[in-house]
Amino acid sequence: MKAKVNKILVVVNPVSGDVKKDPILERLRKLAPPKAKIQIFTTTGQNDRELLGQQMDSFLPDRLVVIGGDGTLTGANFFKLEWPSLLKVRVGFCLLTMHVPRWWT
């Protein structure tokens, strides 16, 4: 049986890489289930993991999507270690990197 996705929390680092994030967010909105609520958490470099923990605690997402570069993905991994109680409930965890190898373009 497929898990129902009602709430998606998207973590976006606006300064990672040279890639604009709006087209990625639009694509994500189109791919999400029609009735899913999506909240965006934009990183600032100031207490991001703590603030994200607070937002997860209040929003209670079914899925957590992280969009960013190496530093953002490292921060997401630290988040998993620092806030294990928030991730005890089954939360799908998806990491999208903004790094595109030169040979890819």
Image (spheres, grey):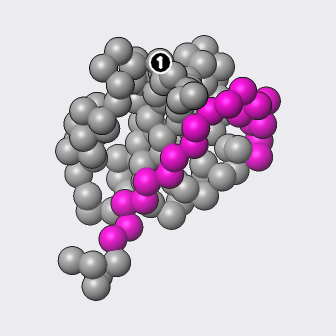
Q: Quadrant of the N terminus?
A: top right
Disc 1 target residue: 6
Badge 1 element: loop
Q: Position of residue 35 (x, y in %)?
A: 35, 15
Left-right relation of 59 to 84? left
Name the residue: 78% across, 37% down: 84
Q: Position of residue 81 (x, y in %)?
A: 76, 46
Left-right relation of 98 to 30? right
Q: Decide whether residue 87 is among the magenta residues.
A: yes
Q: Position of residue 78 (x, y in %)?
A: 69, 50
Magenta part of the chain: 81-100
Front one among 102 and 3: 3
Q: Which amino acid, mark 1?
A: Asn
Q: Quadrant of the C terminus?
A: bottom left
Please tell me how many numbered marks the rendered image carries: 1
Name the residue: 68% across, 31% down: 90
